[in-house]
Amino acid sequence: MDQKVRDYIDKYGVTEETRRFLEKTPKMYIGGEWLFASSGKTISVEEPSTGAELTHIPAATVEDVDRAVAAARQAFAEGEWSDMKAAQRERILRRIADLLEQNTQTIAEIESIDAGKAITGCIAVDVAGSIDLLHYMAGWPTKIEGATRPASLEGENFAYTLKEPVGVVGAIVPWNWPLNMAIWKIAAPLAAGCTLVVKPAQLTSLSLLFFAELCEQAGLPPGVLNIVTGSGRLVGEHLARHPGVSKISFTGSTEVGRQVGKSAMDHVAHVTLELGGKSPMIAFEDADVQRIVDATQASIFFNAGQVCSAGSRLYVQESIYEEVVRAVSERANAMKHSPGLDPESEIGPVISRSQFDSICDYIEIGKQEGAEVVCGGEALDRDGYFIRPTLLGRTTNAMRVVQEEIFGPVLVVQAFKDEAEAVKLANDNEYGLAASVFTRDISRAHRVAKAMEAGTVWINTHDMVDTILPFGGYKNSGIGKDLGPEQLEHFLETKSVWLLM
C-alpha cells in the first residue's frame, strides 16, 4: 500500500476490521479455499482518491477458472446446496444478510477506498440495498414451485411441472457498483439452488472478497460461491465460453456484453445481459423544478455519474428551459468534492485514469460540437481523478455527447416544443435502459411513460430501485431482468413430467 493511501486512510479513520482486511494480501476464493493465482502473478490496484497503489489482486489464469467451475459443478452435483431443504437455504441466506448488516461500516469503507465512492451514499445505497436484496431473495426458496396441469389426452394421465436450478452460474460484475451488482448476480441464483463462479471487475475486487469471508462464516457450503479475480479479457472471456457453465449473468458495457453473449452461445448457455444506457429525462412546463434538481443529484451526479441508468439526457420544455438549467447548475456547482471516506463528500473521484481521460475527452468533443458549457467542464487540480459536475446546454441529438454513453458526471440538456417532439427525441437512441417524466399532469405522465422505449420509467423522480421490481433494458441495453420475482426464472429450468395411470 502506497504511503499516500495510508495517509488518506489515517486522515479519515476506518474500523480495525477494514485495516486488517486491507493490510493482508488478497486471495481468490475457490472451492472453500483461499488461493493465489496458479501462475503467482498479480495485478496492481489503484485507489481513485489519491491515484496511488492500494494493493495487488491475484491475476487468475484459465486453469484457475477451470478449477472454480469444477468446484461449482461438484458442489451442484453433490447437492449439498441444490438439494438442501428450502427453509435451510433461506436461513443461510438470512445469516449472510445479517452478517453483512453487522459489517456495514467495514464493507462500505472497503468499497469507498477501492472504488472512490462517497461513503455516505455507499452505506445508504450500496450496502443497504444489498442487505435488502439478500433478505428478499432469502424468502423465495420455499416459494419456488411447479404446477399440475389437466392433460386432455386419452386415458388416465397425470401431468405436472418441476422448477429446478439451472446449474452453475457464471457472474461477471462491473466496477461501478462492485458489491451491489455482485449481490444482484448472487442472491437470486443462490435462492434458486444454483452454484456460482463470480468474476469481479479487475479495478474493484476487494468488497466481494470480504463478502466471501462473511458467506464462509454464515455456513455457505464450499464450492457454492467461488470468486476469481483478474482481467476481463482473459478470465471473463474464458468463464463466458466455459462449457461447464450453464448460465451467464453479465453487467457492463454493450460492446463487451455482445462478446459475452456470443461466447456463451458457443455452448448454448442461458444469458442475462444488463448493458449500457443513455437515459432521457423529460421535463414538461408544469414540472416541479426542485424534483428535477433532486433527480439529477440522485442519478447523473451520484457516484460521479458512473451509473448505467443515470439521467444523462435532459429534455426541457422551452418555457422553463432557462429556469431548469439555472437551478440544476447552481446545485451542481455547490456540490462538495472530496475523497470517498469524507462523510461530507457529495461527489468523489471517477474510478481510474483511463475513465478520467475518457470523460474529459467527451467534454472537449461536446465543446467542439457546439454545446454550451453551463457549469463544470474541467477536472479538479488535485490528486486523484476528480471531475467537476458538468452541464452541457444547447445540445442536439446529432451530437456524440447526446448519443454516446459518457459514464461520468456530464449532463446534456436541450429544449423541446411539445409532447410529440419530446418523446421522439427521447427514443432517438440505441439504448433503452431507463427514462423519467416530470409533470403534474397524471394522464400525460402515464401516456409518455407508455411511449418510452425503456425497461424502467420513473415519474417525477429518477433512479429509484427496489428489490421487488425487475430491472433491465430494451434495445441495446440488454436481455433479461435483475431483481423482482422475474429474475428467479432466469436461474430455473422448467421440467414437464407425464404419468400414464
Image (cartoon, helix red, strand yellow):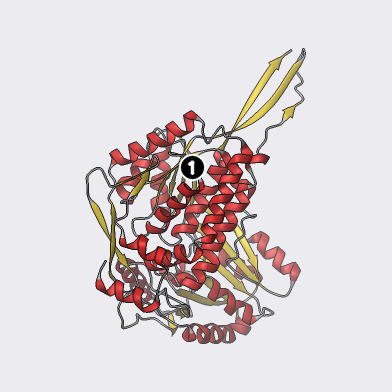
Which image quarter is the N terminus in?
bottom left
Rendered image quadrant of residue 148: top right
Q: Is residue 200 visible?
A: yes
Residue lying at 71% horizontally and 31% vertically, measured from the top left: 147
Image spot of residue 106 (x, y percent): 45, 64
For label 1, the SS is strand
Could you say which is closer to the camera, residue 56 or residue 203? 56
Which image quarter is the C terminus in?
top right
Rendered image quadrant of residue 471: bottom right
Could you say which is closer to the camera, residue 437 or residue 344? 344
Residue lying at 54% horizontally and 34% vertically, measured from the top left: 82
Instruction: Please state the total of marks drawn on the protein image.
Output: 1
Rendered image quadrant of residue 493: top right
Image spot of residue 170 (x, y percent): 43, 42
Image spot of residue 306 (x, y percent): 44, 67
Could you say which is closer to the camera, residue 16 or residue 278? 16
Determine which residue is flagged by label 1.
271
Image spot of residue 485 (x, y percent): 64, 47
Could you say which is closer to the camera, residue 316 or residue 384? 384
Compared across the picture, whether 474 is left or right of 46 comes to right
Instruction: State whether residue 310 is above or below residue 493.
Output: below
Instruction: State whether residue 405 is above or below residue 135.
Output: below
Q: Is residue 433 visible?
A: no
Residue lying at 74% horizontally and 73% vertically, measured from the top left: 441
Instruction: State whether residue 474 is above or below residue 325.
Output: above
* Neighbour tally class for label 1: few under 14, some 14-19, many 20 plus, Cα within 10 Å: many
Q: For the residue marked with disc 1, what is the amino acid?
A: Val
